[in-house]
Amino acid sequence: MYPHLFIGTAVFSSYWVFITIGILSGFAVLIFNTSGVLKNERKKLFLLALIIFIPFIIGAALPKLIEILALKNNTCNGKTGFSLWPGIIFATAAAFPACRLIKLNVWLAADLFAISIAIGGFFAKLGCFFNGCCFGKVCPENYSLGTFFSIYSPAGYTFPDKMLYPVQFFSAISWLFIFILLILRNKKKYFTGELILLMALFYSITNFIIEYYRYHLIEHFLSQSQLFSITVFFSALFLYYYKVKNTR
């Protein structure tokens, strides 16, 4: 796709433009969804968002740093993006002690953040699509959604003049679907914590499937992301069952 956007004489990284839009959209959605929350609780939610934002960035950047250190001859031309799952893990790990410290219901916060994560994930994956990172395998020539990428992107650098599965776009659509689902479910949720668990369930399923079409430097029967998706799915399924059982 287009790793750079040109506005007049200015040149911007497509990836960081979409990442910035995703972050701003996530905060905008959080502000909107907390409009009916008590003022004191709302302040705590914004404070929590600022607290967990730093570990989220650190976690999301960690795989890239490891890749740079481990692979001096990087096949992605050193332009890979951040990883969402590690960022969520780091943010979640920081959220529990933070919620205890500021006396905030962690499940309530998780539900509100889930909607923001979904819209942020949508724009982040669009950023990956334009940047050409996190790219797919070579697809058949008659595949209608096959995508060519610029040779200045990681995908085009690795597979010049080859059509690839647009897995980043598939991921973006899955996040958009989850975002709409959570918005619709928000007013009729069965228990506090349902939204974050639904997000985990649906994205772990879609991510598991999409991973079969994503390119990996070293192929395995199951990728690390798929193994993590399995863990997330069954953990979320157990917690969903537990919460439903205790809500009756």
Image (cartoon, rainbow, N blue to C red):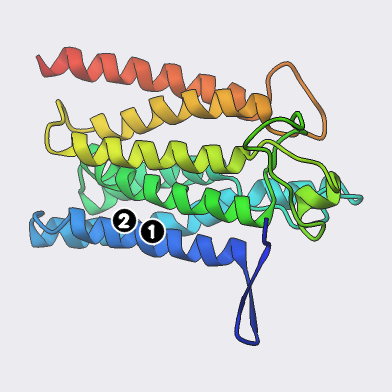
Q: Decide if residue 155 is in sight here.
A: yes
**In the image, is residue 92 above or below residue 236?**
below
For label 2, the crowd category at 10 Å Cα-Cα, with few meaning under 14, some 14 to 19 and many 20 or more, is some
Q: Which element type, helix, strand or loop, lies under badge 2?
A: helix
Q: Which residue is mark 1?
A: 51
Which residue is at the front of the view, 11 or 106?
A: 11
Left or right: where does residue 187 sit relative to residue 222?
A: left
Please determine whether, in this image, residue 229 is positioned above or below residue 115.
Answer: above
Which residue is farthest bottom?
Answer: 9
Position of 20 with respect to 80 (left or right) is left
User: Mark 2 belongs to which amino acid?
Assistant: Leu
Quadrant for the N terminus in the image:
bottom right
- Residue visible at 45% across and 48% down? 122
What's the CA distance linking mark 1 and mark 2? 5 Å
* Label 1 crowd bin: few (<14), some (14–19), many (20+), radius 10 Å: some
Among the 4 quarters of the image, the one containing residue 181: top left
Q: Position of residue 54 (x, y in %)?
A: 48, 59
Which residue in the structure is indicated by mark 2? 48
Q: Would residue 198 be found to the left or right of residue 125 on screen?
A: left
